[in-house]
Image: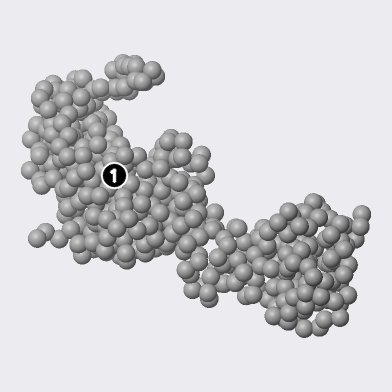
Amino acid sequence: MVKIRTRYAPSPTGRMHVGNLRTALYAYLISKHEGGDYILRIEDTDQERFVEGATEIIYRTLKETGLIHDEGPDIGGPVGPYVQSERQKAGIYMQYAKELIDKGEAYYCFCDEERLKSLVQKIEVDGETKEISVYDKHCLHLSKEEVEKNLAEGKPFVIRQNNPTEGTTTFHDELYGDVSVENKELDDMILIKSDGYPTYNFANVVDDHLMGITHVVRGNEYISSSPKYNRLYDAFGWEVPKYIHCPLITDEEHHKLSKRSGHSSFEDLIEQGFLPEAVVNFVALLGWSPEDNEEIMSLEDLIKKFDYKRINKSPAVFDYTKLKWMNGEYLKRMDDDRFFELAKPYLEKAITKDLDLKKIVNMVKTRIEIWPDIAPMVDFFNEVPEYDTAIYCHKKMKTDTESSLKVLKEVLPVLEAHDDYTNDALYACLSDFVKSHEYKNGYVLWPVRIALSGKEMTPCGATELMEVIGKEESIKRIKEGIALLEK
């Protein structure tokens, strides 16, 4: 059995898009499911798109998501270097491009920009006019002497793949099966650019072979390029890896997930208050599901259950509401100490008073979906916001502003005379008050809670609120509630 080797080969062009994270995750799961190797390779041959600091983002994201690579630029390995610009300086790509030229599978092209522009054609695609450029093999027909003369004179050149114009090329994808393409549709793509750097299309084929990659995971937008890749493998006499082309990820309007959505990258989601482990779990389900249809899964669970043959070919919809629900499930199951440490910055931002944050955090743990949900849920502990007295009216509790004013005036002296402001003692006190006045619990507790918080929804009941804010603040807020109702 050949050991499974997969790779994640991102370009350092900014934040990690959700689609790229899914590619990284699926490649990781395929290798680890079979006890294989997971390689990180940085593809920085497109120098114009290079973003300073983006490589560090890649390292950080993989670390935070738990997708730990076995070989890569930062840790080395037997088939390095693992950065394409370093491989280019070592002459790896030019060596293999020249081998293709010797075989008649590639050729030097000296066409200038003006001539290339003359080849541009306008076509109609789905009612839209698009420009395409198909190279006409002009330089393929240059004599050996002309090529050598141009090279000796230092004339700028690119190296192009020499694709046939007749017949078909067939490649196999693990999800889509055999896919055949008419060779006349294959452009002679550039392998080496005029700056000496390889194109993505050429470098990834050479590197995947030299690094022993057995399974290539990528988005299905690369299906149209796969016949060209196969022709390169065949030209070199190399074994073709297994291809797994993943479905498109769309937003809820079925448009391609873009930066405009506000949640297209891993860092976007972390900044919005999502947990890395919840994001990984969610991204795994964007186009794949386990046999048992379980939805909440740790990375270890995913490794055990992942079968790439269950990846769906249909576009996957990024359901933001589902992600929030899933994140909430992770928060509910989180260890209390870790939850407190992670929630603490959000609590401290919302509450500047010296209160027992541990008591408050226990109130919100099962009620939030993302960290920013905390602030609007607990900000009233700091001070009561301005509120409309209409919220005292509750049909089910049979309360209105008049009855609420009456209850608050009656309960105020009881609470002023009571000194034990622990939850149980307060609840017993108010229960006695309810019984002595022959009221229903909600008839009393609703207006008391409104006066204490200024909100219809709070993470706990009236007596728990009073325990946290204490006697002095509780009496003060009830008096303010009475004054507001009297107006």
Residue at horizontal 44%, vertical 59%? 278
Q: Choose between 167 and 275: the one closer to the eye.
A: 275
What x and y, as percent, mark residue 170?
13, 34
Quarter assignment of residue 147 = top left
Q: How many marks?
A: 1
- Where 341 sits versus 209, above or below? below
Is 436 placed left or right of 329 in the picture? right
Pick out the residue farthest to the front.
438
Kindly identify which residue carries mark 1. 312
Residue at horizontal 50%, vertical 66%? 332
- Where 13 sits versus 355, above or below? above
- Where 253 sits versus 293, above or below? above
Quadrant in which the C terminus appears: bottom right
Q: Choose between 266 and 399: the one closer to the eye.
A: 399
Q: Is residue 132 visible?
A: yes
Residue at horizontal 79%, vertical 70%? 438
Q: Is residue 53 visible?
A: no
Q: Choose between 455 and 298: the one closer to the eye.
A: 455
Is 469 placed left or right of 136 in the picture? right
Kindly state the secondary structure of the residue where label 1 is placed: loop
What x and y, as percent, mark residue 103?
7, 35
Quarter assignment of residue 316 = top left
